Image: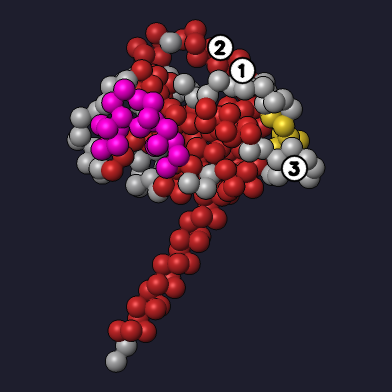
Amino acid sequence: MTTPQDLLFVALDVPADRPVEQGDLSLALAAAELLDLLFAQVVTLRDEQVVPVSGHLTGDPMLDKAAASLIRTEPYESAEDWLWRRGDGLSAAYRDELEHTEPSGSGLRQLFRRADRSVDRIDSEARRHAADRWARHEPLLVGLAAALGIEEPDHEETATTAEHAESAENAEKDKADTVDDRVAVVLAALGEALTELEAVRQRRRIEEDAFDNVWRAP
């Protein structure tokens, strides 16, 4: 299971302040990939530049595709440039990947297409892994979800789950402590990209409204 996969399930299952736009989700999935590649020591960050340091495979098809698309010559691209390039259509790519790999792929396809959150949940190991990681308030997943307007779970309601997974959480925290600065760079780049994307949407809405007003004018 990878952070992008877990984030995708969280985006499907957890209420957000507003509907998650596919473009926003694509950028966040690209950020999640970059974080996983950092943990796998496939890349590092030099200031804000994404620098490949290893060509080894992660074992996950989507992460390996991400690694294969890295720019390996100087000047390297910035973290934000990576999000825009890798994020193009990425939510659809992850949807297609899950439809092919999940045992209930057809049901997953329905869930993607329906806004009604009362639909039956598809039970799978991948979904349970994402739910457990979310219930443990895993910092990387919570940070990525927060950028999409998805609120963190209530600590009291998930206390039992968190205690049950305490040892795993501590292990992940030890890893996170070694890359805190780089995680902050990735999350900051994600925030900037999401802000820019929303600004583009607002400009388009203003232009469309102005065009409509021209045609409605007497």
Give the image quarter of residue 93.
top left
SS type, badge 1: helix
Question: Residue at coordinates 28% horizontally, 43% vertically from top-left?
Answer: 113
Q: Residue furthest right?
A: 74
Magenta stretch contains residue 102? yes
Circles 2 and 1: CB distance less than 8 Å?
yes
Q: Is residue 190 left or right of residue 20?
A: right
State whether residue 210 is above or below residue 133: below
Q: What amino acid is at disc 3?
A: Tyr
The residue where tag 3 is placed is 76
Circle 3 sits in a helix, a strand or a loop, which is it? loop
Residue 200 spot, x, y in % from top left: 50, 61
Q: Is residue 131 visible?
A: no
* Residue 23 placement (x, y as % from top left): 46, 49
Residue beneath disc 2: 171
Q: Which residues are magenta?
A: 92-110
Name the N-terminal-most of marks 3 and 1: 3
Compared with residue 138, is residue 96 higher up or lower down, i.e. above or below?
Answer: below
Amino acid marked by disc 1: Lys
Residue 166 located within the stretch drawn in magenta: no
Q: Main secondary structure of the magenta part?
A: helix
180 horizontally vs 51: left or right: left
Q: Nearer the viewer, residue 176 or 118?
A: 118
Name the secondary structure under disc 2: helix
Q: Which residue is mark 1?
A: 175
